[in-house]
Image (cartoon, rainbow, N blue to C red):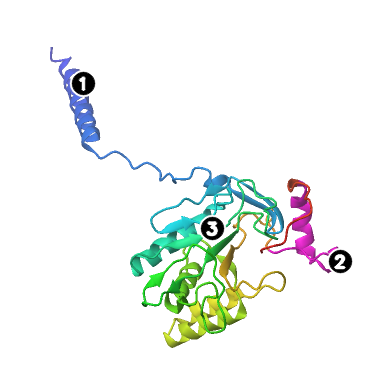
């Protein structure tokens, strides 16, 4: 028995240790699972080609909510996760700051991108149209679902009792250009609206880098509509997609295309289906 005692003690020690470890393991909190996005296709999303000659893969849908409404039911409410997320975040940010505010969003892209009737762009999941925000005759904020044209004094032509809401529209621009997960490339809007918004931002002492960022992003299109009735926001190509995503519409003449753009185009054009004659009513 004495010769077996060390073995027995050792066995007892191992049993106790194993039991304690099991109890500690059972009492320890479960390891945290890796964060899973609510849109599992986000990592697969690709913008292929340019905004005017492109397609979309792995798109996510923009959905209506208390703070955001979709103007159309034509199925053109798909985009890259960065664009859809930015629109949702900006709507929530404005609703939290201005009680009862609703953002009305027009067309994004189709699920697979490509031609969209009434537009020259919106083909690769990086574009969205958003209605202006107004103040009514009683001074209360109004968010008409329709796109309303703004004249030089900021009055809506379709309803003269509505005036362009400088504070809320600037807050929307500010939310876009400071979004933490999307990089705005362009905000197409009429020159007079751009000037109005920048003037308002200056009077409010806006942080200069933000003001500069907004000034660089906002511009009136050189072709097509002047965009005096809505914002057309476009985000930049996602990082890591430089071989398939073309930032801007290509010049018609290949001879004036930069070499870097020609290389990108050559690698992505085979992925973009053949295009028919395109409608050009809106941009």
Q: Nearer the viewer, mark 2 or mark 1?
A: 2
Marks 3 and 2, the one that precedes in the sequence: 3
Q: Is residue 277 magenta?
A: no
Dot 2: within a 10 Å radius of its alpha carbon, few (fewer than 14), some, or many (20 or more) residues? few
Can residue 74 be seen here? The reply is yes
Residue in front for this viewpoint, 49 or 281: 281
Task: Please give the range of residues in magenta.
Answer: 248-270
Marks 2 and 1, the one that precedes in the sequence: 1
Marks 1 and 3, the one that precedes in the sequence: 1
Which residue shows up at 83% across the image and 69% down it? 256
Read off the residue under disc 2: 255
Read off the residue under disc 3: 83
Which residue shows up at 85% across the image and 65% down it? 253
Give the vertical position of 71 relative to 207 (above or below): above
Secondary structure mainly formed by the magenta segment: helix
Q: CA distance from mark 2 to mark 1?
A: 83 Å
């Amino acid at each position: 028995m004495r010769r077996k005692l060390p073995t027995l003690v050792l066995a007892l020690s191992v049993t106790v240790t194993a039991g304690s470890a099991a109890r500690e393991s059972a009492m320890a909190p479960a390891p945290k699972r890796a964060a899973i996005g609510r849109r599992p296709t986000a990592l697969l999303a690709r913008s292929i080609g340019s905004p005017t000659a492109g397609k979309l893969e792995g798109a996510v849908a923009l959905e209506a909510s208390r703070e955001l409404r979709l103007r159309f039911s034509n199925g053109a409410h798909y985009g890259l996760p960065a664009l859809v997320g930015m629109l949702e975040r900006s709507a929530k940010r404005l609703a939290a700051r201005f009680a009862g505010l609703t953002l009305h969003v027009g067309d994004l892209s189709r699920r697979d991108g490509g031609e969209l009737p009434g537009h020259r762009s919106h083909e690769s999941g990086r574009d969205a149209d958003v209605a202006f925000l107004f103040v009514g005759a009683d001074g209360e904020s109004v968010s008409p679902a329709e796109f309303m044209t703004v004249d030089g004094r900021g009055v809506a032509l379709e309803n003269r009792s509505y005036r362009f809401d400088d504070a809320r529209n600037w807050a929307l621009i500010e939310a876009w250009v400071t979004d933490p997960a999307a990089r705005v490339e362009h905000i197409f809007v009429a020159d007079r609206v751009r000037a109005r918004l920048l003037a308002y931002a200056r009077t409010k002492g806006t942080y200069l880098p933000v003001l500069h960022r907004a000034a660089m992003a906002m511009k009136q299109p050189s072709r097509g509509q002047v965009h005096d009735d809505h914002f057309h926001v476009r985000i930049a190509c996602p990082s890591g997609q430089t071989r398939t995503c073309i930032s801007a519409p290509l010049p018609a003449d290949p001879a004036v295309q930069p070499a870097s753009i020609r290389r990108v185009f050559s690698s992505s054009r085979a992925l973009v289906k053949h295009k028919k004659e395109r409608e050009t009513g809106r941009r």
